[in-house]
């Protein structure tokens, strides 16, 4: 049970846009905290901006810079006399320099400390830290590799195939699967070039490639000393390493308790504070291998909220205020099953973004249905930002119940003016392997008929 405490924050700046900005705004209102928000020219009429207590425009030639200009965002927080900044996901959510600047101004960052973000943002260092905390990791290099001969020698030891990854990577950028020694020369150069271009850091490392893998992640909340987990989400239906469908729970009670204890130990070992997602690959034998920690709220945190009944965004804010964990591990229980479909404004065959005006849109409602969206009729979906238009979720007493309800919810949803992924999601909900839970991270590639 929550212990009543006076709220320490009076006003929080939301340094984001779209559905996550609206999600944060609503939670701040629930907590009696004033909601301020930054925005660029493209978002001046958006729903989060219209509903905020106060809005602060940051106009830049490049629309992304309205949300990425650290000094401008810090100045907004100062001008609006905000106690804290909530970064949501993306943009500055994992930027240690931004956190340092807020610390210098005496403004709270709703998330982990800069040093923790720096550690976890370096996949080589994060891998070593989590391995030391007892988390299972795939065999691989413990330091950057720049020579093909060194990489080939390591691969001979751990066995092919292996995968090259960017140390500062994310989103699948700077990754390449290698099946033989003579592929390393070109693969290394390609990964280093992509990593340098995307992250300003050309360091790469090599580890064993997990074939037939499933993607499973664990939700964690920590207060800098202790950590608890809220169970797992299954996120294997992806395209270009971007998740499309997420659901949970997926594991047995015994496996959940086992991996849950490990992720809590991992969070506690680095003094983590806030919400975090520990991501794993699970092989065909059921063995887990640590991938990375996402030190922020996730798009799919909503799945966990439906099956545990806890507002994760609220918990993250409360911990940022200095509260100790308001829950114990034994307070967390799981009920039923939840599925989330990302309704991106994209072509459902090529996944090319589809910006434009929504001439009409209707999102479903009813028992066991949740839809998080900033969209409305007349909304202009910009082409310069992420294509996520809505997160559609259903809850059921079991997985079959949730799937049936998702079919109904997708059939009820109407979006005109832009292309979207509803046809793809609808086909997935009827596909035999999906229904049978026979899903790996190559699900979309192995089912090309789903693309129409």
Image (cartoon, rainbow, N blue to C red):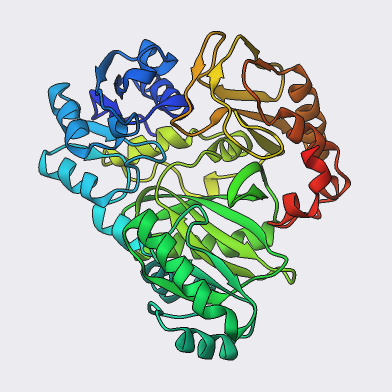
Residue 320: image location, x then y, percent: 30, 40
Q: Is residue 80 left or right of residue 334?
A: left
Number of marks in the rendered image: 0
Query: Which residue is rendered at x = 52% and y = 91% of the image?
Result: 153
Residue 163: image location, x then y, percent: 56, 72
Q: Nearer the viewer, residue 29 or 59?
A: 59
Residue 373: image location, x then y, percent: 54, 22
Vertical relation: 67 (above or below) 248: above
Quadrant in the rendering for residue 267? bottom left
Q: Is residue 211 left or right of residue 358?
A: right
Q: Nearer the viewer, residue 161 or 12?
A: 161
Q: Nearer the viewer, residue 355 or 288?
A: 355
Q: Is residue 134 visible?
A: no
Query: Which residue is rendered at x = 73% and y = 57% of the image?
Result: 440
Q: Is residue 408 visible?
A: yes
Quadrant in the rendering for residue 370? top right
Query: Which residue is rendered at x = 53% and y = 32% of the image?
Result: 387
Query: Which residue is rendered at x = 24% and y = 28% of the image?
Result: 9
Q: Nearer the viewer, residue 125 or 3?
A: 125
């Amino acid at each position: 049970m929550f212990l009543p405490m006076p709220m320490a924050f009076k006003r929080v700046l939301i340094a984001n846009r779209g559905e996550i900005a609206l999600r944060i705004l609503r939670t701040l209102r629930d907590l009696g905290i004033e909601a301020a928000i930054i925005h660029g020219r493209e978002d001046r009429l958006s729903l989060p901006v219209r509903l905020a207590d106060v809005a602060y425009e940051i106009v830049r030639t490049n629309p992304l810079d309205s949300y990425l200009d650290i000094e401008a965002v810090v100045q907004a927080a100062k001008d609006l006399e905000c106690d804290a900044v909530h970064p949501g996901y993306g943009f500055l959510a994992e930027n240690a320099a931004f956190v340092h600047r807020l610390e210098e101004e005496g403004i709270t960052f709703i998330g982990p400390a800069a040093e923790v973000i720096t550690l976890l943002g370096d996949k080589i260092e994060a891998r070593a830290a989590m391995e030391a905390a007892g988390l299972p990791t795939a065999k691989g290099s413990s330091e950057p590799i720049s020579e093909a001969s060194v990489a080939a020698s390591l691969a001979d030891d751990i066995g092919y195939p292996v995968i090259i990854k960017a140390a500062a990577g994310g989103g699948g950028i700077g990754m390449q699967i290698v099946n033989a020694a003579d592929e390393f020369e070109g693969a290394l150069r390609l990964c280093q070039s992509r990593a340098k271009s995307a992250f300003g850091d050309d360091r790469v490392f090599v580890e064993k490639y997990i074939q037939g893998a499933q993607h499973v992640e664990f939700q964690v909340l920590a207060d800098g000393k202790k950590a608890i987990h809220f169970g797992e989400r299954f996120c294997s239906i992806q395209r270009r390493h971007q998740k499309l469908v997420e659901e949970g729970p997926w594991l047995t009670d015994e496996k959940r308790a086992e991996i849950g204890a490990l992720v809590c130990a991992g969070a506690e070992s680095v003094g983590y504070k806030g919400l975090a997602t520990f991501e794993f690959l699970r092989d065909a034998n059921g063995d887990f291998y640590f991938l990375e920690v996402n030190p922020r709220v996730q798009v799919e945190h909503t799945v966990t909220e439906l099956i545990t009944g806890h507002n994760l965004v609220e918990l993250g804010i409360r911990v940022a205020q200095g509260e100790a964990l308001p829950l114990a591990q034994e307070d967390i229980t799981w009920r039923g099953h939840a599925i989330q479909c990302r309704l991106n404004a994209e072509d459902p065959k090529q996944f090319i973004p589809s910006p434009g005006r929504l001439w009409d849109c209707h999102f479903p409602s009813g028992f066991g249905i949740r839809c998080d969206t900033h969209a409305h009729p007349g909304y202009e979906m910009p082409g310069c930002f992420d294509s996520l238009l809505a997160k559609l979720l259903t809850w059921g007493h079991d997985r079959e119940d949730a799937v049936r309800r998702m079919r109904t919810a997708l059939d009820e949803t109407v979006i005109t003016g832009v292309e979207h992924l509803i046809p793809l999601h609808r086909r997935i909900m009827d596909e035999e392997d999906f229904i049978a839970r026979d899903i790996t991270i190559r699900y979309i590639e192995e089912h090309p008929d789903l693309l129409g």
